[in-house]
Amino acid sequence: MEETLEDPPTSAVLLDHCHFSQVVFNSVEKFYVPGGDVTCYYTLTQHFIPRRKDWIGIFRVGWKTTREYYTFMWVTLPVDLNSESNKQQEVQFKAYYLPKDDEYYQFCYVDQDGVVRGASIPFQFHPENEEDILVVTTQGEVEEIEKHNSELYKENQELKDSCASLQKQNADMQAELQRKQEELETLKSIHEKLERKMKEQKDSWETELLQLKGQNQKMSSENEKMEVRVDQLQAQLSTQEKEMEKLVQGDQDKTEQLEHLRKENGQLFLSLTEQREHEKKLEQTVEELKQKEATATKKEQELTDQNFDLSKRLSENKIICNVLQREKERMERENDLLKRENSRLMSYMGLDFDSLPYQASTSDQGGAGPSPGLVYGNPYSAFHEEMPHLQIRLC
């Protein structure tokens, strides 16, 4: 058997599933002389397309699968399948690889899938009869040979009928294959259209997702800024509370004003608490923005308005704090002046200022009338007279 670097593709396909009519072998001799090369001629039918790994093998008659080849040769691909001359092909088997017995063999064309596409008539390998040899044949042998020839002729006719039937079946199958291929092309076209549409839809969704992510990042940045701003407001409120406590401890006459400021600070603290709650709602709104893009602009505008109101209220608080600070400083200066003036007058009159009882004006006196312990009356009377105007400005 032939030794090759690469074995041909074979299969365990049964004979019933082979297509013997797609390749037709021509000029097959009844016997070939041993010791000489053998040329195999074959024709490719119209609907058969050869491939690179197709091969032609010599099989012993009675084979069952393509794995039972004796030797093989790779086929040569034609340059142009549409040319009639290129459909006539041949391969040559070297004498060294041919069988040495006198069994019946046949050529078979096998494609790269291991399926038989054509088979030749049987032939033998034995030498020609020499002229000087006398062949003696009995009458019984002659009758047997004639009977065998008759059976071979009958079998040949059956093979021809079977070949015609197979050719018709092959033509029908080729037409069905062509129709299936057209349907496949149509399905491929529809599939490509669907893929393009899906890609466009995917790109659109990705663009929308990027936009939502950008808006989400923007809202997160604004929330962080709002938190920083709230912390600043809380720090400022804490500072204001400390300053107000110092004012209360330094001057009891400003109790009403400080109470008023505390109420306002309490209101501002409540407003900040409401703002924090609103911020929590905003965080929930940010999560809902992915599904409610339509309401994102409105929520953003509301946050901007609230931020503006907080900034405005903060500015007003700063103004109030500055006014209180200046008022405190002015009152302290006036108190110092009044104390020095009283001390000077007491010294002038020979009285001790520290020994005199000090009585602050009460709410029963309404801030009216001089203090019994002061020569020139209550030095804070002017502050009480100005308090209504200051309260009006604060409100």
Image (cartoon, rainbow, N blue to C red):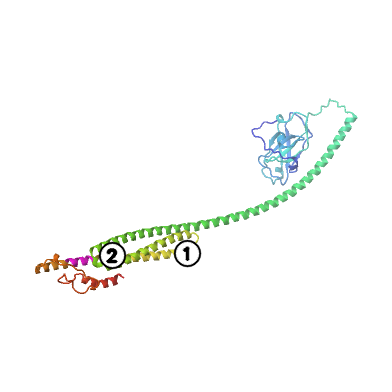
Kindly indicate the quadrant of the structure image that contains residue 351. Answer: bottom left
The x, y position of residue 223, in whole percent, is: 40, 59
Secondary structure of the residue carrying tag 1 is helix
User: Which is more toward the observer, 199 or 326?
Assistant: 326
Look at the picture and state if 104 lies above or below 184. above
**Magenta segment, which residues?**
328-336
**Amino acid type, mark 2:** Cys
User: Which is more toward the observer, 363 or 225?
Assistant: 363
The x, y position of residue 189, in whole percent, is: 62, 54
Q: Is residue 226 left or right of residue 22?
A: left
Q: Looking at the image, how many numbered discs can be counted on the residues? A: 2
**Amino acid type, mark 1:** Thr
183 in the magenta segment = no
Kindly indicate the quadrant of the structure image that contains residue 16. Answer: top right
Look at the picture and state if 237 lies above or below 43. below
The N terminus appears in which quarter of the rendering? top right
Look at the picture and state if 246 lies above or below 66. below
Q: Is residue 40 left or right of residue 198?
A: right
- Residue at which label 1 appears: 295
**Residue 321 — which label?**
2
